Image (spheres, rainbow, N blue to C red):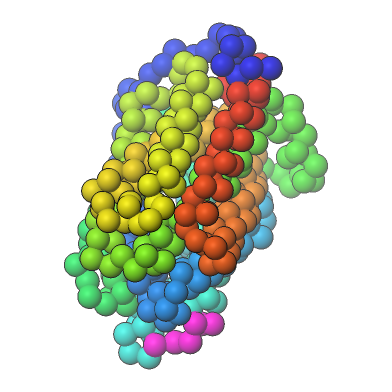
Amino acid sequence: MNITTEGRAEQPAQRSAFTQLRSSPRLLILMAILLANAAAVGAMLVARLQFATAITGSGSGIGSLSLVAALAGGFFGLPSGTLIDRVNPRKALLLVQLSFGVTNVGLGLLLIFAPPPFSVIVLLTFIDGVLASLAVPALAATQAALVPQDARGAAEIMNLLRLGLGGIIGTIVAARFDSPGETIILCGIVTATSGVAAFRVSRSASFERSSPEPLEQLFATVRALPPLRRAVVADLVLRFVIPTQIVNLLLIEKGIKNAAPAIIMGGVVGVFGGNLWLARTGLGGRINRSVLRSFYGFTICIGIASLLSSGDYLVSNIPLLILLVALGSGMGVYAQGTLAALIQQRSPDEIRGRLTGGVQALRQFTVAAGVLFATVTSGFYSTEILGWTITALAAITLVSLRGFRPIGETP
């Protein structure tokens, strides 16, 4: 069934996320507070790239840490989501934020005063991955409890916008520190502080603890909701095809140092731009067309970058590289964000923690596979070969999505 011609079931009117959330001031305040946490995440990513490359001297360092974090989130995603369904998500989010603060401050102190072996950094990264597997469903449940039923997707869009803007702020802040250890200590303090503030502002949220159900019940619920099932499948496909480390691998392989902050910032700005456009358009209208068009744009960007990377033409034209990174990032994150918001909108409250944790686990395994694939391909061959391979996979995905039943079609 053609996604572009047969998704003509009645669709909800298109409204921006800002319009939908006007009556939910506590959600907006929560997002403003957690913007500091998102900035800490952005700064941590920059610091992680710095110290991983300094310790290992190659792209294998950041690739290994990204893989470890993804696997930790994958293995603990579903158990974490199940736990969040049975406890108070607001309290769980506070404990997770405080734990992040402790591990980050500890890692920062180690990097400054007693540089640890890479194995210790791997262990701390694994712990962060486990904590993240708890934070994602806890925040999803908390934000959903602060908005009306029809604004659950808008709340997730606002969360994605927060992450994008925080990434810009974090990248700028990290560039002002000479030592990644100092950056990470600051990130730990900010994360713990914002966690306490978020706990206080979300006190009006009320939750119903779900009774333990067999795992089969979760799958049965998802199977009974075709739009939700299609969104989950499309989401996972895009998580693999849209790479998370290709820019970092390119910077390391080509030895780009002076322009690296500007290129990374280009990607971060692109992510924010994609999320901002999604917040403006909302989830209404022909969702399937929105996903396809944005993914078309991503495929074109990665194809052009692969074509121009031969002979180092792209590397010698940094402004063009920044532009392609920004546009590709924006297009890719728009498609991914649309599907993530749709999943939250369609998710029943009684399984939100398990569904979010389970989907996050599958995402992390998919991301881990993509990171491993990208690291191995660029290591054994080159980032040019990796780029062409991703372009081919993206083209195949486009053909598949065009034959996919409309993602946003209501039952």
In magenta, the rendered stretch is 115-120
Position of the N terminus by quadrant: top right
Residue 141 screen position, x and y as percent: 52, 43
Residue 163 screen position, x and y as percent: 37, 47
Residue lying at the far bottom in this picture: please name it. Answer: 114
Position of the C terminus by quadrant: top right
Q: Is residue 118 magenta?
A: yes
Which residue is drawn at the image coordinates 54% and 82% (left, top)?
Answer: 119
- Residue 171 found in image quarter: bottom left
Residue 22 screen position, x and y as percent: 31, 26
Residue 364 screen position, x and y as percent: 59, 54
In the picture, measured across the screen, residue 375 lies left or right of residue 176, that is right
Q: Height in image: 19 above or below 260?
A: above
Q: Height in image: 359 above or below 15?
A: below
Residue lying at the far left in this picture: please name it. Answer: 176
User: Which residue is more in the foreground, 321 or 156?
Assistant: 321
